Amino acid sequence: MALDEAILEHIHRGDSLPTLRLYAWSPACLSLGHAQSYADVDMLRLQARGWDVVRRLTGGRAILHTDELTYSVATPADEPRVAGTVLESYNRLARALLRAVQMLGLPVEMKEHAGASGPSLNPVCFEVPSTYEITVNGRKLIGSAQARKREGVLQHGSLPLSGDLTRICQALLFTDEFAREEAAARLLARATTVESVLGHPVDWETAAQAFIHAFESELGLTFEEGEVSKSELARAEELIRDKYAHPAWTERS
C-alpha cells in the first residue's frame, strides 16, 4: 500500500510514468477501506492464522488478499483515461478489466447500475454491489475502489483466482457464530473466483498477462515494463514507518 502511494507521488512530481502495477500478497492480508472502522477486525482470529492487516488509501470495505491478482492504477489527475467524474473514469477502467477476464475465458458482464443490497454497514467488500462491477451469473468477480488525491488518481482492485472466499469471515468480528456463518453463506451466493467459474486453476502470470493486454487494447496504451525506483522504494519505507505501520492510520475507528 505504501508503494502504491509512493508511486502516485512520484507521478505527480513528474518523476514516474502513469503506472499499472500487478502484485500478490504474502502472507495473506486483510485490507480495510480508507474510512472503514478498525473495530470490524477480529484481531485474535487474524493473528492466530498468521494474517496481516493494513488500511488502504482507497475506499470500500474489507478484502482478504490471498490467492488473487491485485492491480493498482496510478495516474496524474489530468490523464484523459481517468478524466471526468469518478464514475466516468471507473467505467473506462472497468471496461479494461472486463476485457481482461474475458481473455481468461470467463463469461462475464458489467453491471452498469447495480442497486444497493444487504446491510449498509456490511464489512465485506465482495458482498457490497457497486456501479460498473464485473459479475459472472450475477456473482461479483472483481472488487475495486478509487481515490482521488491532490497527487492524482489511484484505483485498487482484486481478482480472486482460487480458494475459499469465506476465509475473510474468520478475520472480522460478528455478534455470534451464527452471524459469521450467515455472512459466509451470503458471500458465497454473491461472489466467486476464477477457478470456481472455469472449473480449473489459472495461474497468476497468465492472469497478469491478460490484464496487460486488455489495458493496452481497451485504453489505447503501450506499456513499458519497469522496476520500482530507488526513490519510490525509499519513499515507501518512509510511508510504512510514518503511516501504514502506525496505529494512528491502521487502527482508526
Image (cartoon, grey):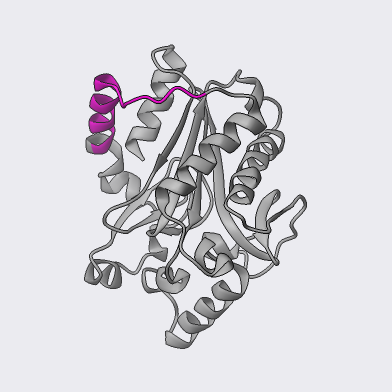
x, y percent for residue 51: 27, 62
Q: Which residue is drawn at 55% across and 72% down?
A: 187
Would you identify the image quadrant in which residue 214 lies? top right
Is residue 145 among what the camera can see? yes
x, y percent for residue 235: 27, 25
Q: In this view, does 176 lie above or below 20?
A: below
Is residue 124 among what the camera can see? no
Q: Which residue is drawn at 47% across and 69% down?
A: 165
Overall secondary structure of the magenta stretch?
helix
Outermost residue on the right side: it is 113
Q: Nearer the viewer, residue 26 or 46?
A: 26
Q: Nearer the viewer, residue 116 or 49?
A: 49
Magenta run includes residue 233: yes
Outermost residue on the bottom side: it is 178
Magenta run includes residue 31: no
* Image quarter (top left, top right, bottom left or bottom right) of the N terminus: top left
Outermost residue on the top side: it is 14
Left or right, 237 with respect to 23, comes to: left
Left or right, 152 with respect to 242, comes to: right
- The number of callouts visible is 0
Q: Which residue is drawn at 29% across and 73% down?
A: 45
* Image quarter (top left, top right, bottom left or bottom right) of the C terminus: bottom left
Q: Is residue 168 above or below residue 145?
A: below
x, y percent for residue 212: 52, 36
Q: Residue at x 70, y 50 (%)?
A: 131
Would you identify the image quadrant in which residue 239 lies? top left
Left or right, 11 with respect to 48, comes to: right
Magenta residues, start to end? 223-240
